[in-house]
Amino acid sequence: MNQLQTPPTGEQFEITREGATAIITELAASLRYFSIDGTEVVEAYAEDALPSFAAGIVLVPWPNRIEDGVWSLDGKQLQLDITEVDKNNAIHGLLRNTGYRQLERTEGAVTLGATVHPQHGYPFHLETTVRYELVDGGMDVTHTIKNLSAAKAPVAVGTHPFFKIGDVPIEQLELTVHASTYLELDARLLPVAEHQVDGTSFDFREPKLVGDRIFDNAFGAVKTVHGASAELRAPDGRTVRLLQDDSHPYVQVFTTPKFAKVSGSGLAIALEPMTAAPNAFNSGDGLRWVEPGATWTLGWGIRYSA
């Protein structure tokens, strides 16, 4: 058997700073590994593997799902490629199978770029970048979207990091989500209504044990507390916080059987910052229209405390 020469996710961009190490992949600009002072704070996957469940990837020009891959522009129906076949949806944008190119790199930061070309159901031309920068206690991530088209372009952005705190089983972590609404979903995980979380099992504004609960839920009206939209806390007090700027009024919480490590009873949890709601190309909820020649800049981050 031949030895693997090139990882399936392409070049591996490793950045380091004062006890922190992160690895970002060429494919989909995925955050494949991140540790601080010896504690892994995202679920890693092997260098010779693809990112299971979209782990760590950048989602442009939409996160989550578009129903039937269909939306309308100026009265004309457009058809995107169906990429979630079992539910007949277009999922997670157009760059999840695209290789990013390095634009700038230092010891503690890397900026990668990728182009969205006009294609099935999306007749727009975008130049995108993502910058991962290690900072005190964590990481800042900055995205830019430049519209190269002659017409304004609909854009939404998301990312798909799976979080952890060392080897603590996910079920033993407490979850906080600073959101006052949740989206009711149908069997295809498409939103049918938005409700206040008050008095419901979706109210995570105070910490709750993750336990054996399975999530695939979008939350809206995100309100950051000390910059954080969500937090995971271990029994020993260690915390990982998700930071979101004002361009990110939504967050998705998703759990799945663990894809890379064998520990606990096998859950992994994604906390996904999103600028728009699922199916935003049809609802318009959070959808951003970028003018020709204009650039949209937005960001999120990760903080770890021992």
Image (cartoon, helix red, strand yellow):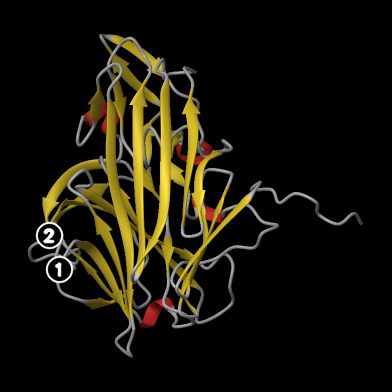
Residue 190 placed where, x, y %? Answer: 31, 41
Q: Residues within 10 Å of mark 2 (few under 14, many from 20)?
A: some
Which one is in front, 247 or 255?
Answer: 247
In the displayed structure image, the side of residue 53 where residue 205 appears, left or right: left
Which one is in front, 185 or 159?
Answer: 159
Residue placed at 49% from the left, 21% from the top? 117
Mark 1 vs mark 2: in front: 1
Above or below for 1 versus 69? below
Residue 5 placed where, x, y %? Answer: 80, 51
Above or below for 244 versus 239? above
Return the mark for residue 173. none
Q: Dot 1 lies on which element? A: loop
Residue placed at 42% from the left, 53% from the top? 132
In which quadrant is the N terminus drawn?
bottom right
In which quadrant is the C terminus drawn?
bottom left
Residue 101 placed where, x, y %? Answer: 56, 37
Residue lying farthest to the bottom in this orientation? 236
Answer whether labels 1 and 2 touch (C-beta < 8 Å). Answer: yes
Which one is in front, 176 or 31?
Answer: 31
Residue placed at 40% from the left, 36% from the top? 60
Disc on the earlier residue, 1 or 2: 2
Q: Residues within 10 Å of mark 1 (few under 14, many from 20)?
A: some
Cα gap from disc 1 to disc 2, whole angstroms: 9 Å
The type of residue carrying mark 1 is Arg
Above or below for 87 versus 3? above
Which residue in the protein does label 1 denote? 205
The type of residue carrying mark 2 is Val
Using the rendered view, name the quadrant where residue 164 is placed.
Answer: bottom left
Q: Dot 2 lies on which element? A: loop
Which residue in the protein does label 2 denote? 197
